[in-house]
Amino acid sequence: MTTAVGAEVDRAELLGELEREVGVMIGRIRRLLRERARTVHEELQSSTYLLLSWLDTRGPLRASEISETFGIDKGAISRQVQHLIELGLVDRAPDPDDGRATLLSASETARTRLAAVKEASRLWLDQRLDDLPDEDLAAFVGLLGRYNVALGV
Amino acid sequence: MTTAVGAEVDRAELLGELEREVGVMIGRIRRLLRERARTVHEELQSSTYLLLSWLDTRGPLRASEISETFGIDKGAISRQVQHLIELGLVDRAPDPDDGRATLLSASETARTRLAAVKEASRLWLDQRLDDLPDEDLAAFVGLLGRYNVALGV
DNA sequence: CCGGAAATTGGTTGTTCGAGGCAACGAAGC
DNA sequence: GCTTCGTTGCCTCGAACAACCAATTTCCGG
């Protein structure tokens, strides 16, 4: 009755399961991010923390690139950046190649604090994933990246 | 200089990368969910879609269980459920074992529509992940579940 | 060529609404 | 009485949408 598409059905089920797990993850991750954001700076918002973290590792970027990466409205990005600058966590510099654009980067203060917070959260998560071999973890990160690409098209 | 902790450093880097990918994912997934929610019902909100989908597959549940699973305030859940009931997408039944509790489940309408939407989105995602073997996909889903457990502790 | 409109792109701001946190509450169970 | 399930009020955050300014590139007639 299941015809010859047994494998297909399995894949469908997998994709369904994927969706559900993603749903659960979103809820849980939100809480975490809020705490972490607060640790970096008293009045840093959770979503802004992600942006800052991204800037920290992905070097100077223009606002429009960030908007594209996260799939979020540029207005929202603009406000978040503004907030980050007020808090002294982001530096702004004119783009030498394009007078309209501005290049954003994490400030020294931000880098220092982020390093501390990330080290702490790394330990926290590492503890909870201690039975997960490095290879599996690497695979997970790789697959997650692959998944993100698929979502971004 | 890096002493003997080469592997440790790698793992730290992996966990950092994980965090960044998760950040990107959150942004992108949100957009997707909004579209998908709209497809199920004109005025279904994105977060509520997740709840409904969960109810669909995880059978009748009480509100407090959902709140716990997603790590979201029970007040928020209460409102979402209310909305779902107004739309006729969720059925409510008193819990025979506990007079205080209510058991929630996806209505027949919801099940039908969800099936259609999920089939469509399954195809969509499947296309974009067509070069990803079933085993890798299975591994990804498994690891994601594992990750969620780690987050939930 | 060249000067200058017209369309494009980067970013900001106003407005609105969705979504969740917190807290106070009523109701049912223990 | 005290805890647990759920609802409700209040507030804040965050993102969409759209209108807007400024710099820039395109293109067109002279």
Image: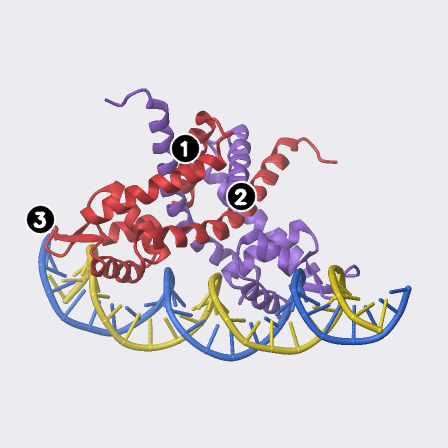
Chain colours: A purple, B red, C blue, D yellow
Image disc number at residue A123: 2
Q: Nearer the viewer, mark 2 or mark 1?
A: 1
Residue B18 location, x and y as percent? 54, 42
10 Å crowding of disc 2: few (<14), some (14-19), many (20+): some
> Horizontal and vertical percent for residue B50?
34, 50
Q: Quadrant of the N terminus of chain A?
A: top left
Choose top left, top right, bottom left or bottom right for residue B79.
bottom left
Specify whether disc 2 shares its chain with disc 1.
no
Can see residue B139? yes
Can you tell which mark lies on residue B96? 3
Q: At 52% from the left edge and 33% from the top edge, which residue is drawn?
A: A137
Estimate the spatial distance between the alpha carbons at disc 2 and disc 3, rounded to whole Å: 44 Å
Name above or below for residue D4 compared with residue B108.
Answer: below
**Chain of the residue under label 2:** A
Distance of mark 1 from mark 3, alpha carbons? 34 Å
Give the mark toward the camera: 2 or 3. Answer: 3
CA gap between label 2 and label 1 equals 22 Å
Instruction: Please report the residue visible at 44 percent of the width from the left and 54 percent of the height from the top.
Output: A30
Q: Amino acid at mark 1?
A: Gly
